[in-house]
Image (cartoon, coloured by chain):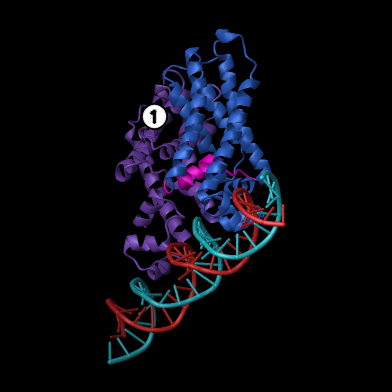
Chain colours: A purple, B blue, C cyan, D red
DNA sequence: GCGGCTCTTGACCGACCGGTCAACTATGGA
DNA sequence: TCCATAGTTGACCGGTCGGTCAAGAGCCGC
């Protein structure tokens, strides 16, 4: 599964055959099919693995923000949490960038773009990951809205979705244009800052 | 080429073989290779076709905005142009949605995600399209900045890239989550509105 | 030693992949 | 009428795809 994660990330799902997958892991072809009914089940397992890592990273980013006493700060804490989330996903990508020498894309986004139209089970599985990601951000955005930290006209739910989209889009552009991973979190910070009221 | 555009869009590059491509166009396999050296050259041609359509649509959106007398409006015109751009790309997607019954993704984004890591020539070709798209938006954003229409701290170049990314990300989420195309332009409008000064 | 279980192995399957090719036909100008 | 050129055709290539399977290996309690 570690090898699969690496190969799917640096190349793509369809471009990596079961043969190559097994060779990389020093496993024989037949053994693979003893544990996985099909190649797509391996992909599902890889997705779950990445998802677990992402939730852990997001949780870690959330607790890293010192809890300011309740809402007295007028949303400063929730704003810091949003920026911390942006940094967290940005750091995951810079990690990939140093490991592989270039931006390789989001594990979910890559698979989603490639397989959403051809494998409905994987599509649904990835949709659930995106939904959970959005839900976590929406919680934060709603909290920001409740504290009056969002500008007029900003819908917290749409902002949450926009942030996931911003990340997915930036990483696609970085991967295609061979640009640096640092741009990704920059763009996220700018969108967040633009959505928050002046001064928070 | 029309058939190829449809099949690449509704499925994916690698999932559609040359055989099927030819069958859909009622062309024999050998004839195809008389005109295209390889399957990837067809993809390149399809990309160019889509790109031409996109530039035409963006130009059309630009002239649709009535030119307010110079910069006296304090950026209202340039703001309208930005929103018109968002509507234009949104309409392209709703067009696809009605044609195919679901959000099928961006012709460039789909191919970029799938092929950026496995076909460097196509990757570079797509990167050029994204760069041109960004350049067109950056022109608008810089004009907005010159007229003082952008909020403090908003970098026009980064905003331009963010808008392309927002579109790419939203469409990926819509495609994966089987949601409506209308969300795409909504998110774009919200990002644009958040980046502009109050009142413009 | 034995039976039963988990796991491994490599040969094998049909289907399909992108791409080639020599032979053929249709067309249009001289 | 003849020829050159443009375009067509379907058989064919080696390679790879995801997936199957019967046989066997290692290990366990008994």
- Which residue corresponds to the image point at 63% horizontal and 19% vertical from the top-left? B65
Q: Could you tell me residue A62's position as x and y percent?
A: 37, 36
Residue drawn where x is 47% and y is 34% of the image: B128
Q: Which residue is mark 1?
A: A186
- Residue A142 in sight in this render: no
Pick out the residue farthest to the top: B72
Q: Residues within 10 Å of mark 1 (few under 14, many from 20)?
A: some
Q: Which sits in the foreground, C27 or A29?
A: C27
Q: Is residue A80 magenta?
A: no
Residue B115 is inside the magenta segment: yes
The answer to whether A59 is drawn above or below residue B133 in the figure is: below
Q: x, y percentage for residue B32?
A: 59, 53
Q: Position of residue A49 (x, y in %)?
A: 39, 52
Quadrant location, the C terminus of chain B: top right
Check the image and report above or below for A39 versus B193.
below
Q: Position of residue B72 (x, y in %)?
A: 57, 7
Q: Chain of mark 1?
A: A
Instruction: Report the magenta residues as a range.
Output: B102-118
């Amino acid at each position: 599964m570690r090898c699969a994660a690496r190969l799917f990330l640096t190349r793509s799902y369809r471009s990596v055959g079961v043969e190559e997958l097994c060779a990389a892991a020093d496993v024989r072809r037949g053994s693979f099919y003893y544990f996985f009914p099909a190649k797509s089940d391996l992909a599902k397992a890889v997705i779950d693995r990445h998802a677990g890592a992402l939730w852990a990273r997001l949780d870690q980013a959330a607790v890293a923000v010192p809890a300011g006493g309740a809402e007295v700060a007028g949303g400063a804490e929730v704003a810091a949490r949003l920026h911390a989330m942006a940094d967290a996903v940005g750091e995951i990508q810079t990690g990939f960038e140093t490991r592989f020498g270039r931006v390789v894309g989001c594990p979910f986004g890559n698979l989603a773009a490639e397989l959403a139209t051809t494998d409905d089970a994987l599509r649904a599985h990835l949709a659930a990951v995106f939904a959970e990601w959005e839900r976590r951000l929406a919680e934060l955005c709603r909290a920001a809205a409740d504290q009056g930290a969002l500008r007029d006209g900003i819908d917290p739910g749409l902002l949450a979705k926009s942030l996931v989209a911003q990340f997915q889009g930036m990483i696609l552009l970085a991967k295609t244009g061979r640009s640096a991973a640092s741009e990704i979190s920059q763009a996220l910070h700018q969108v967040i800052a633009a959505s928050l009221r002046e001064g928070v």
